[in-house]
Image: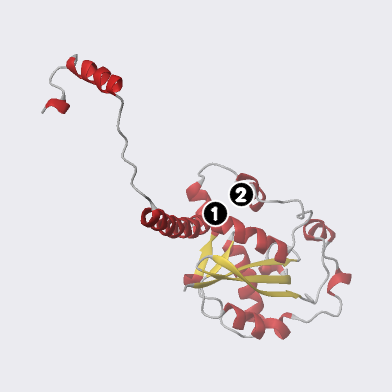
Amino acid sequence: MTRSVLFDTETTGFDPLTGDRVIEIAAIELINDLPTGEVFHALIDPERDIPAESTRVHGITSAHVAGKPKFADVAEAMLAFFGDAPLVAHNAPFDFGFIDAELARIKRPALDRARMIDTLVLAKAKFPGMPNSLDALCRRFEIDLSARTTHNALLDCKLLAEVYVELTGGRQRGLVLESEQSLSFAQYTRDAERTPRPIVPAEDALAAHAAFVARLKDPVWNS
């Protein structure tokens, strides 16, 4: 079995180098690219204000994170959940950049970029020249977006997990193997129980076939 972790962050802004901070982290465990139901989720006190324009994107206000743990308080649990697995994210350099900035503040090493799997890169390779935002991919794969009124790290992870399955063919691979096994067993059962019933054509049908073959040039039936 191959374990990977799909994760997402919500932040106070777009650039950790200018003081923007992480306010939400969510992660989902995948085994062979399929969700197992194991989840990590934390709302985080960013130790600064959350601008109104950011709240319009993700719906999180300063009141939502008041009294929540700081990043330093959840870092160990997050890293333990990540383990040494590949890390999947949409526009992964953005999320890696923010997590790395938070890790640097507590003097922990950055995430290994060799672990990065960027679903945006996968989507652009699969659908070049087309919109490849998470919303666009959900619509393309007919994934229900009705609950996504704002960006939410945990909901986005769940949606991205469905998108990732489609991008990697994971669900199709599993269904093909399962259907092939079921078909093989069913075919074996039918073959074992079948009673041979020879089909004997009527005389007029044999005559009609012979007349048809006689009109053909060098028919293989006469070889």
Q: What residue is rendered at 72% in x and 80% in y?
A: 71
Provide the residue designation for mark 2.
Answer: 137
Q: Secondary structure at mark 1?
A: helix
Residue identified by numbered label 1 = 166
Amino acid type at mark 1: Glu
Vertically, is 25 above or below 69? above
Are the two marked residues, 2 and 1, in contact with CB atoms closer than 8 angstroms? yes
| Res. 97 image quadrant | bottom right
Towards the viewer: 143 or 62: 143
Q: Nearer the viewer, residue 168 or 101?
A: 168
- Residue at 61 percent across and 61 percent down: it is 161
- Where is the C terminus found, in terms of image quarters? top left
Residue at 62% of width from left, 59% of height from top? 160
Label drawn at residue 189? none
Viewer-side residue, 81 vs 166: 166
Give, as a three-letter code, the residue at label 2. Leu
Determine whether the residue tagged by mark 2 lies in a helix, strand or loop.
helix
* Residue at the left extreme of this rendering: 223
Horizontal side of 56 relative to 111 (left or right) equals: right
Q: Is residue 92 left or right of residue 217?
A: right
* Coordinates of residue 191 in the picture (x, y in percent): 37, 54
In the rendered image, the vertical position of residue 142 relative to residue 10, given as above or below: above
Q: Position of residue 89 (x, y in %)?
A: 59, 64
Q: Establish if 6 lies above or below 164.
A: below
Label 2, residues with CA under 10 Å away: few <14, some 14-19, many ≥20: many
> Of callouts 2 and 1, which one flags the residue occurring earlier in the amino acid sequence?
2
Q: How is the image coloured?
A: secondary structure
CA separation, marks 2 and 1?
Answer: 10 Å
